[in-house]
Amino acid sequence: DKMQSIGKGMSTYVTAPIVAVGAASFKAFGEVDDALDGIISKTGATGKEASGLEESFNHVAGNGPFELNSVGDAIGSLHQQFGLTDKELETTSTKLLQYAEVNNTDVATATNNAKSNIEAYGLSNKDLSSVLDITTKAAHDSGVSVDDLTQQALKAAPAAKGMKLSYGETVTLLGKLQKGGVDSSKAMSYMSK
């Protein structure tokens, strides 16, 4: 009877927690593996390049409170679209993850929108950080989402370039127009004539 009590106590206080830790570890390994698979599928990286991306993933994931799949999206998207590697990739991934979190958007959408606007406004990849900062400020000042602002800025790019407006000036103007209840796409069209 005493042995049964000891056995039951060990099962409850020793074996069950060990099994729970094992299950959590297995789940965490699966999440890391899925995120790394996502990086490889986005980039097509192999060998040394894939190892470098995995190392960057480990640095970013280990230094922030971000979801692993989001870290994988950031690493994969920034490497694929901007050609970033190593420390620059890690720093920019962290900034992009913070941008996505603060602005309630996903990393892939944020990357695609930023890249499209960088190209539309004749900017360089080095302007990514500035584009994210300007967009965040305009969104917070106007109450318009960053996704809406970046999409509007992309549509307004030809008119904005015709009026010699920068990306920053355009996204700020679009935000102010939207905040004032003005249809910004119509207003940009009228102003460009």
Image (cartoon, grey):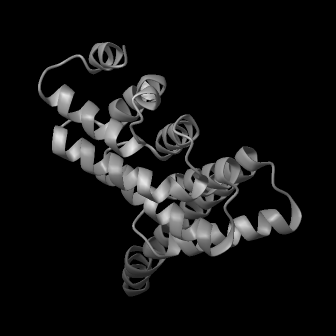
Question: In the image, is 120 to the left or to the right of 144?
Answer: right
Furthest residue toward left:
180
Depicted 131 relative to depicted 91: above or below:
above
- Give the residue drawn at x 46%, y 31%: 161
Task: Identify the image quadrant of residue 49.
Answer: bottom right
- Give the residue drawn at x 46%, y 43%: 110
Q: Is residue 106 visible?
A: yes
> Looking at this view, is 59 or 15 the one in front?
59
Task: Identify the image quadrant of residue 9.
Answer: bottom left
Q: Is residue 67 visible?
A: no
Question: In the image, is 20 to the left or to the right of 138?
Answer: right
Depicted 141 relative to depicted 145: above or below:
below
Question: In the image, is 21 to the left or to the right of 56?
Answer: left
Marker count (numbered):
0
Residue 29 rendering spot, x and y as whole percentages: 61, 63
**The C terminus is located in which quarter?**
top left
Task: Identify the image quadrant of residue 155.
Answer: top left
**The N terminus is located in which quarter?**
bottom left
> Looking at this view, is 148 or 101 the one in front?
148
- Give the residue drawn at x 60%, y 70%: 88
- Give the residue drawn at x 57%, y 59%: 126
Question: In the image, is 188 to the left or to the right of 183?
Answer: right
> Looking at this view, is 133 or 64 the one in front?
133
Depicted 88 relative to depicted 118: above or below:
below
Residue 64 rendering spot, x and y as whole percentages: 43, 71
> Looking at this view, is 56 or 131 the one in front?
131
Residue 36 rendering spot, x and y as whole percentages: 67, 57
Residue 178 rendering spot, x and y as whole percentages: 20, 26
